[in-house]
Amino acid sequence: MAMNVSIACFSVFSYKKVNRIRAVSSKDFAAALKTEEGDKVKLGGSELKVTRLGIGAWSWGDTSYWNNFEWDDRKMKAAKAAFDASVDRGITFFDTAEVYGSRLSFGAINSETLLGRFIKERKENNPGVEVAVATKFAALPWRFGRQSVLNALKDSICRLGISSVDLYQLHWPGVWGNEGYIDGLGDAVEQGLVKAVGVSNYSERRLRDAYERLKKRGIPLASNQVNYSLIYRVPEQNGVKAACDELGITLIAYSPIAQGALTGKYTPENPPTGPRAKIYTPEFLTKLQPLLNRIKGIGENYGKTPTQVVLNWLIAQENVVPIPGAKNAEQSEEFAGALGWRLSNEEVDELRSMASEISPVIGFPVEKL
């Protein structure tokens, strides 16, 4: 993985000073949660508006966790169809990362490269389409200081083929040097390379530290992207969700359908394959069945699928933007059906109560750093 910007890409980056984004107080944040421009919300205290539900691009180009360790032209076309179907249905917020599909993670093709290609092809047919791109910096042990963040960001911008990124996030906390990484995020805002900045997999303590460090520069911390679903509610238990609500930081929920476990697709007799098989075992899926049956029943009352119900459950928590991963057009179309309606408070509480009886699956280890 290149650590510096190639000469071919250098012309993209002419230094430009931009007006500093105003950090907003917590009491002002309620206004930011209101729907704007159709069904968009502001990310935290930033001025960036995104759709209430986004699409995760972790699986695009990946051969280390997804796609049965294979990537071919058929899967490429399916990913492109997922992108187009999402945009067709008004979902224009896409989340990727420099490590997704990269050689560093033993992938076939970088997810950023694919997303950039899909955006370019879409704009050729529809020049007016606007897509919000979020990507992430990998806090690798050999990366030091604020300049490493800027270098990696510029490389991501080159792979994406765009002039700036809408949301740039620290993918996980570093073993050391996090203050420098946060400073790099602030520099990226001031140099006009990004519209908003966030973190991912940050604990409550690290989240508060990042928020305060950026606040001193008048820059809002827009988001914290964490593992959050009906059966993985650790952000509610470790203080992260409460801190996000208090500070006016949007919680972006990855794995919101528990990597497919909450869709009803998998059963004890038909568990997922690959690495997920070690997490969502037949034993776990057996315990999950009563909850899945109730999710299905609630969905039938609304004419919705289990997937749409569990995504709507997350949206009902307020200040949460789920980003399920879409491998094909059918999945994107189904995700769009999670919008435009709402579970009742009683249903939200009932599902949480039933889910609380199930021991949570493992999360990302760095959440506890």
Image (cartoon, rainbow, N blue to C red):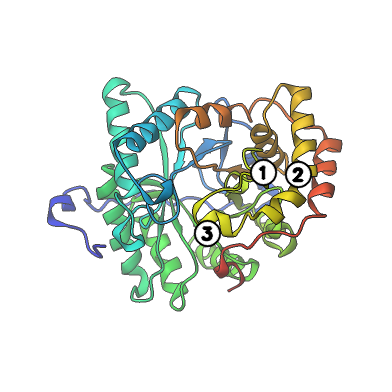
Residue identified by numbered label 3: 200
Contact between marks 3 and 2 (CB within 8 A): the answer is no
Question: Can you say which quadrant of the picture contains the N terminus?
Answer: bottom left
Instruction: Looking at the image, tell me whether mark 3 or mark 2 is earlier in sequence order.
Output: 3
Question: Can you say which quadrant of the picture contains the C terminus?
Answer: bottom right
Spatial separation of the CA atoms under disc 3 and disc 2: 31 Å
Spatial separation of the CA atoms under disc 3 and disc 1: 31 Å
Of residues 22 and 58, the one nearer the viewer is 58
Amino acid type at image mark 3: Ser
Contact between marks 2 and 1 (CB within 8 A): the answer is yes
Q: In which quarter of the image is residue 191?
A: bottom left
Instruction: Looking at the image, tell me whether mark 3 or mark 1 is earlier in sequence order.
Output: 3
Residue identified by numbered label 2: 289
At x 66%, y 59%, the residue is: 361
Residue identified by numbered label 1: 267
Q: Where is residue 172 in the image (x, y as percent from the top left)?
A: 49, 65
Image height of 78 relative to 108, above or below: above
Q: Which residue lies furthest to the front in this view?
A: 269
At x 80%, y 47%, the residue is: 352
